[in-house]
Structure formats: structure tokens, C-alpha cells
Image (cartoon, rainbow, N blue to C red):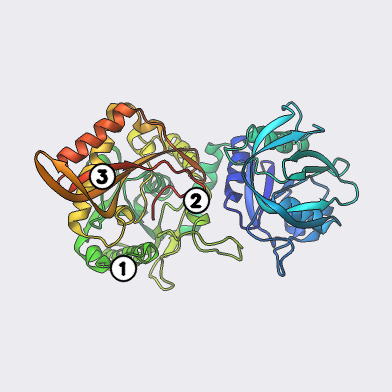
Amino acid sequence: MADTIAVLDFGSQYTQVIARRIRELKVLSRIYPYTTKASQLKKEGIKGVILSGGPSSVLAKGAPKPDKKIFDLGVPVLGICYGEQLMAHMLGGKVSKSSHREFGHGTLKVAKKGKLFAGLPKSLRVWNSHGDRLSSLPKGFEAIASTENSPYATIQNADKDFYGMQFHPEVAHSEQGIEVLRNYVIKICGCKQEWSMSSYIEQSIQGIREQVGDKRVILGLSGGVDSSVAAALIHRAIGKQLTCVFVDNGLLRLNERENVKKLYQDHFDLDVRVAQKSNLFLSRLKGVSDPEKKRKIIGNTFVEVFDEAVTRLKRSGDYAFLAQGTLYPDVIESVAIDGNPAALIKSHHNVGGLPKKMQLKLLEPLRELFKDEVRELGSELGLPKEVVWRQPFPGPGLGVRVMGPIRKKDLDVLRKADAILHEAMMEADLYYSVWQSFCVFLPVKTVGVMGDERTYENVIALRIVESVDAMTADWARVPYDVLRTVSNRIINEVNGCNRVVLDISSKPPSTIEWE
């Protein structure tokens, strides 16, 4: 079995990013609930423990705490943000409220490199997100780095290989954060770099076969990366036991149904059925503005559609599973599950919108992966570039890109504008170099002049971002001439739009999607 690092989850949005960074080092990482017993970790032979950040304060009543015996396992322990404060607090140190909350970039001054900062500069730009700070250290610990507002920004007990850091090395904003994690995982924990996507495929195929047995599976195929890779992986595992259903919910992009059908006829030997349900979805969404209600309506209606498909298909086999391309970011941004203390940001229709009673059990073979890992998996499975590198598209479709109530005529405006942006990004050879590029329909009207006539029409916002894993993102610096072309074409070619604006916010604090 490959060497494994255990990441105990205390509800941080970045917990899965920690796990992802470790996998980038070709070391297997697993996320465990913070309540996991030390005896279980010992039984599974983990090589190191990372305590994640989280929204709680160690000073709060009922703050989540791990089994204290993890500090007796004889393996290195690394606490990040809340994890550092928690480790210090449990081992005899003191934590207090900081007079200055540290959020965003800071400068880390390294006083003692030791094993953790070996080979790194003495000054690093790092990303902070905390309100508490250490006020005194446990016995055997020393401070080895500081920031502007935290003299104990990094601490260590070198004898026991216990380390804590107030900043987040896992996020892209932290300079050489991956090298800090490399020092911990490779040099301190002694892990061998043996984990690979090919081994993940083998394990997943075996797991799917064991879970499904001789039953049959329905997969909601959207044509996007996630559902396509899930379909290829499941098809590799169980072949003709898989039936794919493509739902036209009226919230698709321009010509999407036709393009998806053509793509799968050309590249896949899959049983694909098309369900035309646009009227059903749009009628249920009529007058609904709240994004959470939209997501739940869309999610519940998807389930009903699949239940109907099950009824029709039961004559030809025993369908017992609904497969979905749920990823880690879908899970972390959804309702807290399994005792996870994460704060709710938004629900995802794959995770938070499903009713408690349904005819099918869930099969989610990509649930532990990030988007870039899914792309790597798709390439390993031999999928074409237009599938593997297609930009992410939200499960609720254009339903969460039309702000406010959804009307067919507004969807038509958005579809045409979005198609223009897509075409321009492809022509400029920029489509595959950004994470996402899409349009948002705003529920406001502005005055304009076209020819000699006054217009009073809608606004389209452009959202173009760069990211690695969707957990953090920054707006892409697209050349002005491309933006000018897009704006001119949308205003001149799309009836109902007379203004185009550009979204230049980053994640955090904003999300990539507007709803």
C-alpha cells in the first residue's frame, strides 16, 4: 500500500486543497473526520497527520477537537491555522483573540529554517485567514517564523516532529507553499512518491464493480468534463450496465443538445437517451429568484426525471444506481455532512438538492478528486481534448447565470452572448488557457444609443477567471482587443442587450459563479 498522509478535517474550505497539494507530490492523501480515532489511523499505517484549518475558535465552547492520542502515534503532525492553535492549546500552550485579524497576504519572516523551511528563502509572501493567535507556546516548542501580527506564525517541536503554521501553505497565494508541504511530506514524514492516477483508476474500477455488482446504473450526462469522465470510468468498469440520460432542461447553452449528441456518437460507445424536459424545468422555476431555491428545484426535478427514466427502463434491467460527476469542490461548498463543522456557502445540486427519498442509490466515483485531477483521469482514459479540457459548467446550468427570475427570453439573450464569448476566446487561443469564461445576465436595464434611437435594454457581465482547482481564482487579464471584440459583437448581434461589463473580483472573497 502507498504511503499515506491523513488530513483531519475541521471544516476549512481549504481542507481538500491540502489533500490535493499532497497528491501533486505523488503521495496518497486521505481526508478523515476530525473525530477519527488515533487507533484507526495507526491501523491504516498513516505516515503523518495534518490538522486542517476551520471556521471555529479553539476558545469557543464545543470547538471541534481530535483524539488527543494522535500526538502519541509517533508520526509527524502538522497543524495549519486552526490546526496550529488547536495543537498548541491541547499540548499546554495558550491561544487568545488577536487585536488585528490577519486576512489576505502577509510577509513571513523565517528565523530558523529547520526541516520545514529547508532550502527556502528567509522571507515569503503567505496567505492568512485567522482571528485568534498563539500567546504562549507548549513545552518543547519554539517559534521559527513570524508575520506582522503573529510572533508565532510557525512553531516546531523538532524532537517530536510537531509543526504548526498560522498561514495556509496549500493555497496558490502562498509563495512556495508547495515546497513547505514537500519538506513536511517527503523529508519529515519520509513518504515515497508512489501514488499515480493509473493506480487510482485501478482502485476505482474495483470499487465500482464491488458497489454495483450485477445491477445497472443511470448517469446524468451533461457533456461536461465531470459527467463525461464519470461515464468513461464507469463504462470501463461495468460496460453495458451503464445507461446515460441527457436532460434538456431549457438551461443549456446554444446548440448544446445537438453538440453533445454528435460528440458521443463520434467518440463513445454509450447508450445515451435524451429527455426533453425544458418546459417542466422552466415552469417550476417561474418567478423564483433565490439562488438556493433555484438549485434545489433544479436538483429535485433532475431526480424526478431520472426516476421517470428508471420506470421506463426497468423492463430491460435492474437499475439501482444514479451516477453523478460530483467533485470535492461540490462537496466542500455544500451543506456540512458527516459531522463536518464547515460553514455553509452554497448547496450544489449534486449534493445539497437531493430529496431524502429517491428510487436510486448514489454512485459518485469522482467525489474525492479536484477538477485538474479529473482532467488527468480523462486523459488516462483516452477521452478527446474537447471533452477533457472543456471548461466547467454548473449543474444548474444557465439557471444560476440569469440573476433574478428566469424567463425564456432572458435565457435566449444569455445563450447568444455566451456563444459569442466562447467563439472569441477560441479564436484568440485563450479558451483552454483560462479556467472559465462565461456570461452572466443581470436583471437591470440601462440607457443606450443605437443609431439615432434611445435604447433601454439589459446588461451582460463577462466572468473570465484563472484557477487550478476552483477553490481559489483570480480574474484573467484578457487582452483589451479581445474584450472590445466581445463587447461590440454582443451589443450589435444580440437583441435585448446594450451594455457589457467585466467582473474583476477574485475568489476569495467572491465565488466564481454569481449564484
Image x and y of residue 156, in percent:
82, 42
Point out the image quarter for the N terminus: top right
> Relative to the observer, which residue lies in front, 339 or 141?
141
Quadrant of the snapshot with the C terminus:
bottom left
Count residues near mark 2 (Cα–Cα under 10 Å), then give few for <14, some for 14-19, many for 20+.
many
**Percent x, y of residue 398:** 29, 53
Label whose residue precedes the other's in the sequence (3 or 1)? 3
> In this orientation, does residue 193 appear?
no
Mark found first going from the N terminus, 1 or 2: 1
User: Which comes before the other along the chain, label 3 or label 2?
Assistant: 3
Name the residue: 72% across, 69% down: 61
Q: Which mark is residue 304?
A: 1
Neighbor class of circle 3 (other Cα within 10 Å; few <14, some 14-19, many 20+) is some
Q: Amino acid at mark 1?
A: Glu
Q: Amino acid at mark 3?
A: Val
Cα–Cα span, label 3 and label 2 = 24 Å
Q: Residue furthest bottom?
A: 357
Q: Is residue 409 left or right of residue 139?
A: left
Secondary structure under tag 3 reads helix
Label 3 belongs to which residue?
260
Q: The disc labelled 2 sits on which kind of residue?
A: Pro
2 or 347: nearer the viewer: 347
- The answer to whether 56 is drawn above or below residue 183 in the figure is below
Q: Is residue 59 left or right of residue 206?
A: right
Residue corresponding to mark 2: 329
Against 427, residue 285 (above or below) is below
Residue 154, position as x, y percentages in the image: 76, 42
Tally the numbered discs. 3
Q: Residue at x 22, y 67 (%)?
A: 283
Q: Nearer the viewer, mark 3 or mark 2?
A: 2
> Which residue is nearer to you in this view: 373 or 43?
373
